[in-house]
Image (cartoon, rainbow, N blue to C red):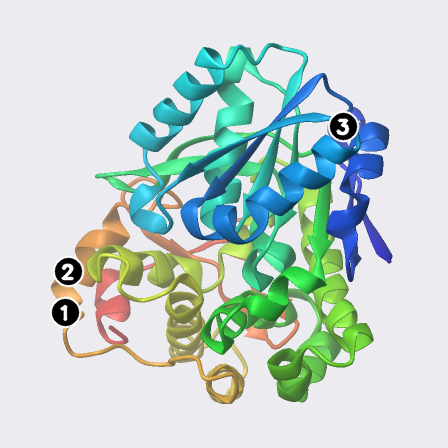
Amino acid sequence: MVTVPVSLASTPEASYEVLIGDGLLQDLPAILRHRCPAVAYAVISDDIVGERLGATASAILEKAGIRAELFTFAHGEPSKTRETWASLSDQMLARHFGRDAAVIALGGGVVGDVAGFVAATYLRGIPYVQVPTTLLAMIDAAIGGKTGVDVPGGKNLLGAFHQPRAVVADIRALRDLPAEQRANGMAEALKHGVIADAAYFELLEGSQQAVTTLEPASAVERIIAGSVTIKAGVVSADEREGGMRAILNFGHTIGHAIEAVSRFAVMHGGAVAIGMTLEARLAEQLGIAERGTAERIRSAVESYGLPSGLKPALRADAMLAALRHDKKGREGALRFALPSRIGAMARAADGGWTIPVAETDVRSIV
């Protein structure tokens, strides 16, 4: 097992660890007793993961004498809503879960966001543990304490920062995932390399076989741990996204707009892959990034079977309208986290980590 600490300077008591290994689900009772003790656990999952792993997890806990009940909702981004949050909260109340209970988020990024938001708000906040089951969630979504839901005005506009007590990444959960889902997660891994670590990015440029086969397990652990270490370092320095944490949004400004305009027909990883390619091209056009940065990113995302360009159906006007609703905007300006080269991000003139960009410049790439 590999352990990566997430040490939060602003709230040391909320620091936790990410556990990465093969078969960790079997160790869940011991992990919970040590890191998140509770009288009862609400295991929140979606209908697909719940059927595949929810019963297994509940049985493991019950065999250890731990009360656990499974709550599921329809899978996919369209279910990441206030209505789902309310339904899960009401079901827990009906089952008499009290302040001495905890939540287990068992699933991908959508499950983690929704279950985390339930935990953040249920009886004004109860503890929770992330048990991510997708590569994307293991290396990115489950770490950092961001929870929330989507609303008609945009993605992730309602939520709270609520750090988990632990993140338990069981590589065995990835074995049933289709290749498309694994590739979906690699977009975030590549992002981590671009924003902070050129050597890690280079490692990923040659790791397609390991991601496809999940062999050897040590190579997969190394990839996950590399991404977790990078994200943990950023989150540790800026828990509530007041400064440096904004670099984690590289590729996501355009990526979220793609998701919105396509009504989530484009998977998150694919949207981020396109977003990174286009935002890097924007950085080069503005003279911010070294020439060749966008091409290297494009080549890397395509090597994992991810898209790198917009389809004609995603019209520029619709994309710009979605970008105007992005929560990273300030005073009406479109702002982007942009790379200066692979492994480093550019700073704005005011020292900030997002750069204001004119709509005319954005229109030239979308």
Check whether the beta carbons of the residues at disc 3 and disc 1 lie within 8 A of each other: no
Residue receiving disc 1: 315
Residues at badges 2 and 1 in contact (C-beta under 8 Å)? Answer: yes
| Location of residue 118 in the rendering, given as x and y in whole percent from the top left corner | 49, 26
Q: Which of 23 and 179 is in front in this view?
A: 23
Badge 2 element: helix
- Label 3 sits on residue: 36
Name the residue located 63 percent from the left edge and 79 percent from the top edge.
211
From the image, state whether disc 3 or disc 1 is nearer to you: 3
Question: In which quadrant will I find the C terminus?
Answer: bottom left
Above or below: residue 72 compared with residue 195: above
Disc 1 marks which amino acid?
Answer: Arg
Residue at image coords 53%, 87%: 296
Q: In this view, does 84 lie to the left or right of 324?
A: right
| Quarter of the image where one finds residue 174 | bottom right
Kind of residue at disc 3: Cys
